[in-house]
Amino acid sequence: MKKYLSIILITLCSCNLLDQTSESSFTPDNFYKNADDAKAAVNSVYDAMKGANMYDQVMWVLQDQATDDAEWGGGRSTANQAKNDLDKYTFTPATSTFQSVWSAAYQGINRANTVLARVPAVPMDTALKSRLLAEAKFMRGFYYFTLVRLFGGVPLILQETTSLNDLAVARATADEVYTQIIADFSAAEIVLPLTYTGADAGRATRGAAKAFLAKVYLTRADWPAAAVKSKEVMDLGFYGLWDNFADAFALPNKNGKEAVFEVQAVGGGLGEGSYMQGYMRPNFDRVNGIAGFGDDPVTANLYNTYRAQDKRRDVTIKLYTPTGTPPAPASVTFPAYVHKYLDPSATANGEGSNNFPIIRYADVLLMYAEALNEQAAGNVNAYDAVNSIRKRAGLEDFPVTLSQDQFRDSVLLERRLELAFEGHRWYDLVRTKRLISAMQAQNSSITVAERNYLYPIPQTERDVNKNLTQNPLY
C-alpha cells in the first residue's frame, strides 16, 4: 500500500531548518495545539504545490510540453523518456509524470482535509482561524481543479485519512468534482482578505478565489458566471497591468499588482527556489557558471506567430544565433528558449527567486473578454479588456468588425501569446476542442486522438485500487 501515496501521505507541519524536533514525534493528536501549529499545517498544504512533483519540475511538462508551444529539449535528445513521450504523444498510463502529479495533488488534498478536521478545535484567534480554514479550502479546490482538468473524474476525498483501511475509493464524476471545487472556492472568497503583508505575501486571497471561480466557469462554458466572476476581480480595484510586459516577471514585482496567484520561490540554495529557468534555459547558456538543461525549447510555430513589433516576444523567448553570446551550436536547428523566468543572480544549480504565475491579471481580462463574446458579439467591454493587453504589447486594437467566431479565435491567439509558458495552453486547447488540430499543425508525424483530451489515470494507482476505472481508449 506504500505506492498509494495519493491518499495516505499525511504531513503535519511545514519544514523549518532551524527546528530541531524530530518530525517523527508529531501526530495529529499532539501537534494541533496553538495558532503556530495551525499556520504551519496550512503552510504544508501550499508546500505540496511547490514540491518537485508539481510546479518545480512536473506541471509545466503536462501544461506546455504537450502543446504546440514546446518541443522536447535536453539538447533535443530523448534522454528523459517521460518528457519525450509527452511531447510526442506516445505516453501510456505507466508514464511516470502522471503518477507524480496525482500523488502530489492528493498529498495537498489530504493535508487540507487534515487542517479542516483539526484546526477548528485549536484555541486561537477566531479571525485567524477562519482565514486559515478558508486557505485550506482554497487549496483543496486548487488541487481538485488541477486533477479534474487533467484526468476527468477522480476520487473525491473530503475527510482526513487516518488509516490504511477503505482506501479503494472509486472515481467521482467530473460534475461531482466540479461541484466541490466551486463550493471550496466560493467558501474561500467570502473569508479571504484582499491582500497580505510581510511574510504572508503570496497566500490565497479573495481575488485569487474569484479568479479561479472565473476559470472554473470558463472551463465549464458557463459564460455568464465566468464574466461575472472576472468582473468581480476587476472591480476589486486592487489589480492592474504593469506598463511594460517585462515588469510582470521582474523579481522586484513578485506578488505585485498583476499577480493574482503565484507559486512562491526564494533562491539561495535552500531548496525553496524555482528551477524553471534552469530547466528552460539551454544547456549552452550559463548564468553564474551554471548551464541550463535545455528542456521545453520553443517551437518555431510559436515564435513565428508573434509579430515582429510584439513586445512580448523577446521578453518571453530568447532566440540564440551562431554569432550571438553565447553562440548557438549548429546542431540545434531552431535555438529558441523560454526567457521570461531568467534570474540573473541565480546560483546553486540554477535555483532562482522567480515566482511562477498561476493566474495573472492579464488572464482575468482575457477570460472576461472571452466570456462576454460568447454571450453576444460586439461587446464593447470585451474589446476594451483585450485591447488594454494589446496596447501594452505594442499592437493595434482589435477591429470592431470582428464576428463572434473571429473574436473567439483572436482571443485564443491572444492567450497563447500573452500567457505562453505560464501553464495555460494545454487547458485552452482542450476546453476549446482544438488540441488535435493544433498538434497536427505543429507536427504532422504526431498522432493525437480524441482520447488525449484527458490524460490516463496512472497505472500505479489502478494497481493498488481496483475501483479506479481508466479513461476511454487507454
Image (cartoon, rainbow, N blue to C red):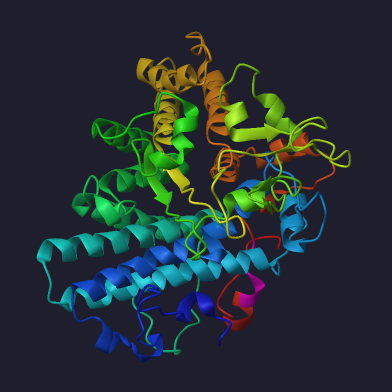
Residue reaching furthest front?
A: 288
Question: Percent from the top left, x then y, of residue 41?
Answer: 31, 72
The answer to whether 205 is drawn above or below residue 30 in the figure is above
- 81 is within the stretch colored magenta: no
Instruction: Determine if residue 180 is in view.
Output: no
Horizontal side of residue 72 vs 472, given as left or right: right
Task: Quadrant for residue 300, please give it.
Answer: top right
Q: Which is nearer the eye, 131 or 352?
A: 352
Question: Percent from the top left, x then y, of residue 100?
Answer: 59, 68
- Which residue is painted at 80% across and 38% down in the image? 328
Q: Which is nearer the eye, 65 or 151?
A: 65
Q: Quadrant of the C terminus?
A: bottom right
Horizontal side of residue 283 vs 213, given as left or right: right
Question: Percent from the top left, x then y, of residue 152?
Answer: 53, 58
Q: Which is nearer the eye, 98 or 280?
A: 280
Task: Quadrant for residue 93, please give it.
Answer: bottom right
- 459 is within the stretch colored magenta: yes
For the stretch drawn in magenta, the main secondary structure is loop
Horizontal side of residue 358 vs 113, given as left or right: right
The answer to whether 94 is drawn above or below residue 291 in the figure is below
Horizontal side of residue 376 vs 126, given as left or right: right
The answer to whether 377 is drawn above or below residue 323 in the figure is above
Question: Percent from the top left, x then y, of residue 216?
Answer: 41, 46
- Which residue is painted at 64% across and 80% down in the image? 463
Q: Quadrant of the N terminus?
A: bottom right
Instruction: Determine if residue 90 is in view.
Output: yes
Region in magenta: 456-460
- Which residue is painted at 50% across and 8% down in the image? 401
Q: Which is nearer the eye, 224 or 407?
A: 407
